[in-house]
């Protein structure tokens, strides 16, 4: 039972990684270490969140998308999403312009 679980779930961290086939010798390989692929995107989301006073910006590591929630009053919750930080920033500005044209006469900057 334990051997079967080890086969299913691996033997744990720090163990050798290799390839083998029946009748061939064990060949050790180096595991690929690409680091955290989302590290730059997470950092971009934190930076955007700090820069954008009227938005809460988040990065979804599962979806690998950026999300922004408007903090200013809107008739319905305003959420925009994009694949890149730059695209999110563009979508945020587009949403602000649309809200300013269709929303109340009070400017966005007046809300704290």
Image (cartoon, rainbow, N blue to C red):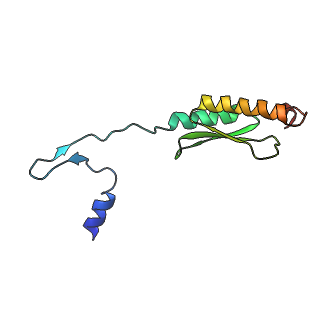
**Residue at the image position 11 percent from the left and 47 percent from the top:** 25
Location of residue 12 (image quadrant): bottom left
Left or right of residue 25, residue 85 in this image: right
Left or right of residue 77, residue 34 in this image: left
In this picture, is 79 found above or below 88? below
Q: Nearer the viewer, residue 54 or 43?
A: 54
Q: Nearer the viewer, residue 26 or 75?
A: 75
Q: Residue furthest front?
A: 102
**Residue at the image position 33 percent from the left and 59 percent from the top:** 9
Location of residue 7 (image quadrant): bottom left
Q: Nearer the viewer, residue 27 or 85?
A: 85
Q: Residue furthest bottom?
A: 1
Image x and y of residue 107, in percent: 87, 31
**Residue at the image position 42 percent from the left and 38 percent from the top:** 35
In this picture, is 37 found above or below 17? above
Image x and y of residue 13, in percent: 34, 52
Asked if residue 89 can be seen in this view, the reply is: yes
Image x and y of residue 73, in percent: 83, 43
**Residue at the image position 20 percent from the left and 43 percent from the top:** 28
């Amino acid at each position: 039972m334990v051997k079967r679980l080890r086969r299913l779930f691996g033997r744990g961290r720090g163990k050798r990684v290799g390839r083998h086939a029946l009748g061939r010798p064990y060949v050790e390989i180096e595991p690929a270490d690409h680091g955290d692929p989302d590290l730059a995107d997470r950092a971009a989301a934190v930076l955007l969140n700090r820069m954008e006073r009227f938005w809460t910006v988040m990065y979804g590591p599962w979806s690998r998308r950026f999300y922004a929630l408007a903090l200013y009053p809107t008739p319905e919750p305003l959420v925009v999403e994009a694949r890149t930080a730059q695209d999110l920033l563009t979508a945020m500005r587009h949403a602000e312009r649309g809200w300013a044209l269709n929303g109340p006469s009070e400017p966005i900057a007046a809300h704290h």
